Structure formats: structure tokens, C-alpha cells
Amino acid sequence: MVELANIKSFKLGSSIKGFFLCYQKHLKTTRLGDPFIDVILKDNTGSIRGKVWRHVEYFSSKFEKGDVVAVKGSIIKFNNTNEVSLSFVNNVSDDFYSEYGYSSDIIIGSIDKSVKVLYTYILKTINSLPSNHKKNLIYLYDVYENKIKVSPLEKKEYYLKGGYLLFIYNLLVHFSNIIKNYNKLDADRVRLCILLTYIGYIDFFDENLVFSISDKGKILDYKILGINLLNKISSNKISEEDKLFYQQCIMMDRDTQDINIKFVRYLIELDSIAR
């Protein structure tokens, strides 16, 4: 069995072999006009930037953004940050690499909480909302239940199978614990915004073993995908006022004047800082 490295274990100067998700891929040129490939690689321990300097055209044809790839390379320092100088990259598209230690668990782990418990709590929250919002959210969460239960988020601590569900659950619980201290907030609108803000991740990832980036996700970011999902349920008699609020929650504009949306943004930032 080949000894595989994970991103967390990378040390400056070491040679590495492993399997990773190609999260980003860009063809670029140096100041002298030489082509190179710039990538972001991810596994279940973290992410790192990598570059292909040689045989660029050949290796570029071997993989795309969103693919799981087998790589070889060495860890170097660039701009005071470790990255991988890649000497080999290839798409992992079949069972060929399983004998070399490849498993989807290398790419993405799973949450350590009960999906049933988390989803039940979220449904209970939805059912506590005013009837117009409850109807819309029940419809959305019912249609996409399977994907909601398994989708990850891009956030490091939630890049797990079920990460989206855990993220929503954590925010709802945090808010329930502190709402009594904020009497200017509309609790229903805050909860509604939490339930909608990252909904676009339902379409951002494919529902496969490693949750590679979907064709839609390669073109559009999660906010636009969220708006598209919202438009799909527009026939469900959403008022223009409610639809506008839903859109603002999904876009999470820093310039918004709505204190409930601002609060959700701060709650998300606090969750990231505290983990």
C-alpha cells in the first residue's frame, strides 16, 4: 500500500502523494508569459494551494475543477505560505486507484451528530414560524430533504457530509440561547434568515460520495444558486415582500439596513471565530 499524505501533515520540503478534491483550477501565465496551472486542493483535514509548472497542457487535460485527483509533488514555501509544487496530477474517475489506497473518506468526513435529531429540530423550528413562512420553508425543505441532510458547506469546520445541516442547527441553537437579550430583533425573521442564507449549497455540490462541485457550482456561486432555488418555489404563492426578504437573506449584503439580516451575518461570523 502506498503511504498517502493528508494536507494537515504536509511539512516544508517533504515529497507527497495523495488524493484530493480539486476545489479550484485556473490556467495562468507568469510575467514572462510561461503557462502554469493554479489549483486549490482539499481533503478531510484542510486545503492548500498547488501549482503545475511543467507539461502544463498535458496535465490540464487530465482533470477539471471539482474532480478528485491523484497527485505527486513537493511542499514549498511561497509568499510565506506552504503550497504544493505538483509534478503529477490525474483524475480519479474509476476503481483503478482503490488498490493504491483511495477512498472517498479521504476527501470528506461526516458529522458526528445524529442527522435525524438535527433535521427534527430544524423542522420543529420551521413549524414555529408564521403560516406564510412555514408553508414556504416546509415546501423547500421537503422537496430537497435528501440533499439538505447530506450536503457539506465550503466552510472548513463544516466541510463534512451533513455539514450544511449541522451549520443551520448550530446557528438556530445559538440564537435560541441568546434571543432574550435582544428585544429589538424579530425572532421569526432571524430564524427564517438562518434557514435560507446558505440554501444554495443544495445545488452547489453533486450528491456523490465526495460531493464534488456540480456543473452548476462550477459556473455560479452558492448565492445565485440559492436565488434560483427560491425562484423554483415562487409559484408557491410567495408575496413580493416575503420574496424580497428571502432574497436579501440569501445574498447577505453587508450594506443591508435590516437589523435581523445584520444579526444573522454577525452570528455566522461569531460561529466561525469560535470554532
Image (spheres, rainbow, N blue to C red):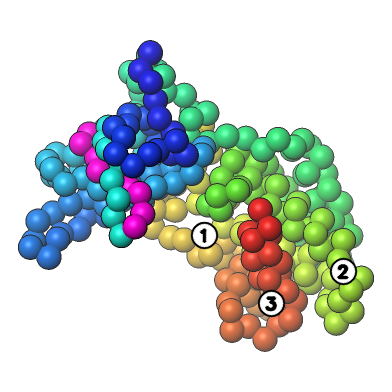
What amino acid is at disc 2? Ile
Q: The N terminus appears in which quarter of the rendering?
A: top left
| Cα–Cα span, label 2 and label 1 | 28 Å
Q: Which residue is mark 1?
A: 222
Does 133 sit above or below residue 182? above
| Cα–Cα span, label 3 and label 1 | 19 Å
The residue carrying pointer 2 sits among few (fewer than 14), some (14 to 19) or many (20 or more) residues within 10 Å by Cα, namely: some
Is the magenta region chiefly helix, strand or loop?
Answer: strand
Mark closer to the chain start, 3 or 2: 2
Q: Residue at x 13, y 43 (%)?
A: 54
Q: Is residue 219 magenta?
A: no
Mark closer to the chain start, 2 or 1: 2
273 or 228: nearer the viewer: 273
Q: Residue at x 83, y 44 (%)?
A: 120
Q: Secondary structure at mark 1?
A: helix
What amino acid is at disc 3? Lys
Q: Quadrant of residue 100?
A: top left
Q: Is residue 87 magenta?
A: yes
Q: Residue at x 12, y 65 (%)?
A: 31
The outermost residue toward the right is: 180
207 or 156: nearer the viewer: 156
Residue 262's disc is 3
| Residue 144 in the image, given as x and y percentages of width and height | 65, 47
| Residue 3 in the image, given as x and y percentages of width and height | 38, 21
Q: Which residues are magenta?
A: 80-89
Residue 179's disc is 2
- Judged by depth in the image, the label closer to the viewer, 2 or 1, is 2
- Judged by depth in the image, the label closer to the viewer, 3 or 1, is 3
186 or 143: nearer the viewer: 186
The residue carrying pointer 1 sits among few (fewer than 14), some (14 to 19) or many (20 or more) residues within 10 Å by Cα, namely: many
Q: Is residue 85 left or right of residue 223?
A: left
Mark closer to the chain start, 3 or 1: 1
